[in-house]
Image (cartoon, rainbow, N blue to C red):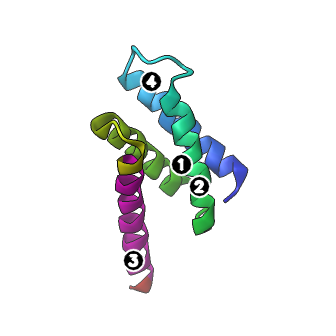
Amino acid sequence: MSSQAREGACAFAWRNHLLLHSGISENDNRRSALYRYIANLRTTGEEDFALLQIVAVAYLKKLDELYDDQCARIAADQVLAECLEARNAKSER
């Protein structure tokens, strides 16, 4: 995964998260958790910036809903799997 795609996806998701939640500090712990999660996706080899954005937003949303990093990771991984499956099905047509 390119560093640029990873950084860009995190920045996009974090900016949007701050817009939706005005009481959150720029240096909130969720930001570093997001970067760790996206950095761990490099093992998948995924470099699609748009897909990384979707997964980053999904992770933050689930982190807010579930208040648990592990559960948020699982939920975001599910979103990633669904997006990859849809992309693969589309390319097979």
Dominant SS type (magenta)? helix
For the residues labelled 4 and 1, the Cα–Cα distance comes to 18 Å
Q: Which residue is mark 3?
A: 90
Please rate how many residues cluster around mark 2, counting C-alpha atoms within 10 Å: few if below 14, some from 14 to 19, many from 20: few
Task: Please give the range of residues in magenta.
Answer: 72-91
**Sequence order check: which comes first, mark 4 or mark 1?**
4
Please rate how many residues cluster around mark 3, counting C-alpha atoms within 10 Å: few if below 14, some from 14 to 19, many from 20: few
At 43% across and 69% down in the image, what residue appears?
84
Q: Is-magenta flag for residue 84?
A: yes
Q: Hey, what amino acid is under mark 4? A: Leu
Q: Are marks 2 and 3 in contact (CB under 8 Å)?
A: no
The residue lying toward the viewer, choosing from 74 and 61, is: 74
Q: Position of residue 17 (x, y in %)?
A: 42, 30
At 33% across and 43% down in the image, what residue appears?
62
Q: Which residue is mark 1?
A: 37
Q: Are marks 4 and 2 in contact (CB under 8 Å)?
A: no
Q: Which residue is mark 2?
A: 40
Query: Which image quarter is the N terminus in?
Result: bottom right
Residue sitting farthest toward the bottom: 92
